[in-house]
Amino acid sequence: MDISTRALLRWVLLLQAGAVAGIAYLAHNAGAGWPLAVLAAIGVVLLVRVLITANNFLLTRRFSSSTPAEFEVGAAGRLALFGEEFMSTLLQSSWFMPRAVAGERIYDDAPCAPLLLLHGYGCNSGYWAQLVPRLDALHISHAALDLEPIMGAIDDYVPLVQRSVEALCARSGSKQVIIVAHSMGGLVARAYLRAHGPGHVMHIFTLGTPHHGTSLAQMGVGKNAAQMRRSATDGEGGSAWLRALAASETPQTRSLITSLYTHHDNIVAPQTSSVLPDAHNIAFGGVGHVALGRNRRVLDCLMQELVKLFTH
């Protein structure tokens, strides 16, 4: 039976709560008072989460592309990068995504085409918790979609996107939508274009999408992870699925895409895998993969690019 990301994360939270209870019980039996025992148990669980984030950064170092001089960060910048990525991951997996319910908001006075928000691998619509208030502030209509089953093939998500595009156009009165996608969601958007063409799509913004695959996907599970893999035998084009997707696109199709990416991505490696030829590519430094959806500089840039669409 398929399980939703929301349900899976709730089970993970229950396991973490159980771990806290168990560690606190052992610490109390060892002589610690209950307040100290509970604090120590929470600290242990948080330390494990810190180590997981650190491991992601360590794994990407082996496959990383070179960082241009203008995007290099010093020791303080790396500490800030790590802290923001850790907090982003913690908040997404422990608060926003376990509580998320995919939905939409339509404004009669919307200044542009509505946005369809597509999350990445292992996430859900809760990923967009920091972007949605910005859209609401400008009365930009939007809808979020949960891409499930979690481990399904990327092409299997295309019918979900098609139905969402058609429904969003119908309810907003717009002939086209703008897609904003994080990570795997960007590949889903491109797969949608391959299947249905650009008729209902004004533009696509991808954030940290492994357009040519990522070496870390070799450790992922599911058909979608396999499609995002990049190994020495695959070459720069990534998996056979990614190469076929690229072969189906023309420069005109690519011109509809803006790729925002970071040279310090701790999931997409090499980081230049997010650079898409014939698309508009915007690079950042000092930002991690999950943090792309909440980093102020990235969201400011995204909003500026959106404004350009409906003012020109």
Image (cartoon, rainbow, N blue to C red):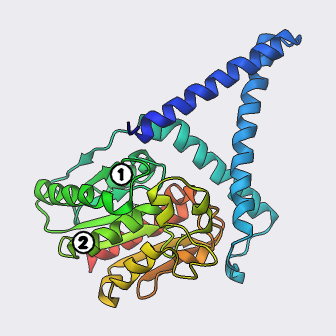
Q: Which residue is painted at 82% across and 17% down in the image?
A: 27
Q: Quadrant of the N terminus?
A: top left
Judging from the image, what secondary structure is the residue with disc 1 in? loop
Nearest to viewer (mark 2 / mark 1): 2
Residue 168 is labelled as: none
Q: Position of residue 258 (x, y in %)?
A: 41, 76
Q: Position of residue 296 (x, y in %)?
A: 53, 59
Q: Position of residue 123 (x, y in %)?
A: 46, 48
User: Is residue 248 shown to the viewer in this render?
Assistant: yes
141 is higher (above) or lower (below) than 212: above
Alpha carbons under labels 2 and 1: distance apart: 17 Å
Q: Is residue 254 left or right of residue 20?
A: left
The residue indicated by pointer 1 is: 147
Q: Which residue is painted at 74% across and 53% down in the image?
A: 54
Q: State which tag comes first along the sequence, 2 or 1.
A: 1
Q: Is residue 74 left or right of residue 223?
A: right
The residue under label 2 is which amino acid type?
A: Ala
Q: Residue furthest front?
A: 233
25 is higher (above) or lower (below) than 214: above
Looking at this view, is 130 or 152 the one in front?
152
